[in-house]
Image: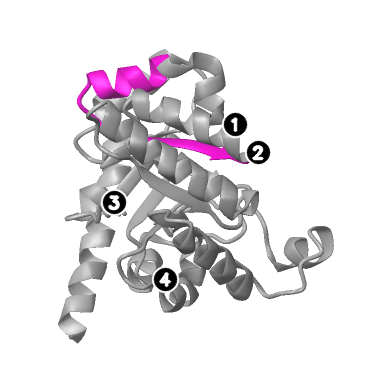
Amino acid sequence: MVVKKPQNAVERIILALDVDTLEEARGLVVQLKDYVGYFKVGLQLYTACGYDSVKMIHDMGAKVFFDAKFHDIPNTVARASANLVKNDVDFFDLHIKGGSKMLSTTCRLCREVAKKYDKPAPTILGVTLLSSFGQKTLNQELNVNMNIDEYVSRLAKVALESKLDGVVASASEVGAIRRVCGDEFIIVCPAIRPTWSVVDDQVRVVTPTDAIEAGVDYMVVGRPVISAKDRIEAITLIIDEIEEAKETIKERL
């Protein structure tokens, strides 16, 4: 299993490039590449620009988290994921609800392809429950009769047993995940919203301090930075908050 734990506050930050053009994305990478660890390419940018977005980020010396959220039959997901390896994607994710066969087949093929082409094996993450979902959606719309912590920790266990490197989950579920999967398992937290930002369409949101206190490894932030009048100031405030939270934890020990 590949374990890539962040070493400092900057490495913890994944900036979501949720924009519609390659020019906008390039501008963000140029401006913020020294302030974040990874840039996230999601469906919005990828459907507009394709692999040009990934190539552009790598050409600028930055790292890519491809937010694929693959969920299909095992062979399809495995082969699509292998193409990500060939294109030097650093992180990517797939839905755990696709099942253990889909997950394990993908992990095995990706690591074989990485070895064959002499490339670093990617960090493969499993998506637990989307951050736009709350307890009511889980119970009434998905007809899952569990609380969110129990549901997410069960999915995380499937991911671990299928040889994934970690999961994407809210900070509020980190404790439950750690009890099942241990401290080396990577947890990426989406929906990061500093206290000075708006929540938008997310439900299970947390601040950078909340995420660090919970034991999150990486955190995804997008609109609070991209929409800020001064992006450097916004991302610097987030870095400072992460560092302060880490110092507070050290002082307690």
Q: Are marks 4 and 2 in contact (CB under 8 Å)?
A: no
Query: 206 above or below 58?
Result: below
Query: 139 above or below 167?
Result: below
Within-10-Å neighbours for mark 3: few <14, some 14–19, many 20+: some
For disc 3, the marked residue is 2
For disc 4, the marked residue is 181
User: How far apart are labels 3 and 2 at the CA level?
Assistant: 24 Å
Where is residue 7 shown, x and y percent of the image? 17, 55
Where is residue 113 shown, x and y percent of the image? 35, 31
Q: The residue under label 2 is which amino acid type?
A: Ile
Q: The residue under label 3 is which amino acid type?
A: Val
Q: Circle 4 sits in a helix, a strand or a loop, which is it?
A: helix
Q: N-terminal of the two: label 1 or label 3?
A: 3
User: How far apart are labels 4 and 2 at the CA level?
Assistant: 25 Å
Q: Circle 1 sits in a helix, a strand or a loop, which is it?
A: helix
Q: Are marks 2 and 1 in contact (CB under 8 Å)?
A: yes
Displayed quadrant of residue 246 = bottom left
For disc 1, the marked residue is 76
Within-10-Å neighbours for mark 4: few <14, some 14–19, many 20+: some
For disc 2, the marked residue is 73
Q: Write the start and end of the magenta stretch as one range.
A: 52-72
Quadrant for the C terminus, please.
bottom left
* In-front residue for pair 31/163: 163
Q: The residue under label 4 is which amino acid type?
A: Cys
Q: Are marks 1 and 3 in contact (CB under 8 Å)?
A: no
User: How far apart are labels 4 and 1 at the CA level?
Assistant: 27 Å
Q: The residue under label 1 is which amino acid type?
A: Thr
Q: N-terminal of the two: label 3 or label 4?
A: 3
* In-front residue for pair 171/142: 142
